[in-house]
Image (tube, helix red, strand yellow):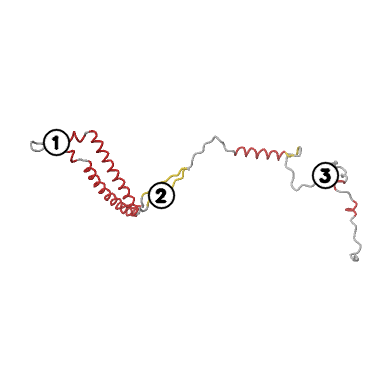
Amino acid sequence: MTDTRGPQPQYEGYATGPLPGEREPAPGKASGPYHPPQAYPSPAGGTEGGRSHGTQGGAQGAGAAQAARLPRTGARTTPRTRKARLRVAKADPWSVMKVSFLLSIALGICTVVASAVLWMVMDAMGVFETVGGTISEATGSNDNNGFDLESFLSLPRVLIFTSVIAAIDVVLATALATLGSFIYNISAGFVGGVELTLAEDE
């Protein structure tokens, strides 16, 4: 293969010239190590020992800022409270009736148990015997011994009477609570209902 480009010029300066680090300093300039050109100017304050004063000052400022941001371990933070204002717009009559029915049954059972315990305590203290004797003497005569309080206020009669009162209370409480829910819904349609403020501690 033959070269058809012809004679090429020779770049003698690149071929025979010294490298940048081997060149002699220009007259009027002090000799020293070669420093490549820098894209950004060096910070103000000069360099000392390979580190600039500006860099040291920036590092000290950053360290002081980080030290200032460190939280104090002994400080106590106040808990933040979140509050929500809600409004009871409607009460479901069916749910009100179920809840009131169960609560009234529990109240009736407590009433029967409390009556039985009270009767046994009073009987152990002799209250019925003392009061019954006084009433018998006051209402008695030659032909009649008077009213017998102990037989009238016996434990079975007291429990039966208390059970009847508890059953009536269950029916009335359930009906009144359900009726109250209807009345509340009607009044809430006019005035907007009861407003509640709920708070949550974090």
Q: Which is more N-terminal, label 3 or label 2?
A: 3
Position of the N terminus by quadrant = bottom right
Q: Which is more N-terminal, label 1 or label 3?
A: 3
C-alpha separation, residue under disc 2 versus residue under disc 3 = 78 Å
Asked if marks 1 and 2 touch (Cβ < 8 Å), the reply is no
Helix, strand or loop status at disc 1: helix
Asked if marks 2 and 3 touch (Cβ < 8 Å), the reply is no
Q: Quadrant of residue 56?
A: top right
Q: Which is more N-terminal, label 2 or label 1?
A: 2
Q: Crowdedness of circle 2 by 10 Å Cα count: few (<14), some, many (20+)?
A: few
C-alpha separation, residue under disc 1 versus residue under disc 2 = 63 Å
Q: Nearer the observer, disc 2 or disc 3?
A: 2
Locate residue 36, reporting x and y percent: 80, 46
Q: In this rendering, would 146 be left or right of 181?
A: left
Q: Residue at x 37, y 51 (%)?
A: 88
Viewer-closest of 94 and 91: 94
The kind of residue on which mark 2 rests is Leu
Q: Is residue 149 above or below residue 186?
A: above
Residue receiving disc 2: 86
Q: Residue at x 8, y 38 (%)?
A: 143
Q: Which mark is residue 94?
A: none
Q: Nearer the observer, disc 3 or disc 1?
A: 1
Residue receiving disc 3: 34
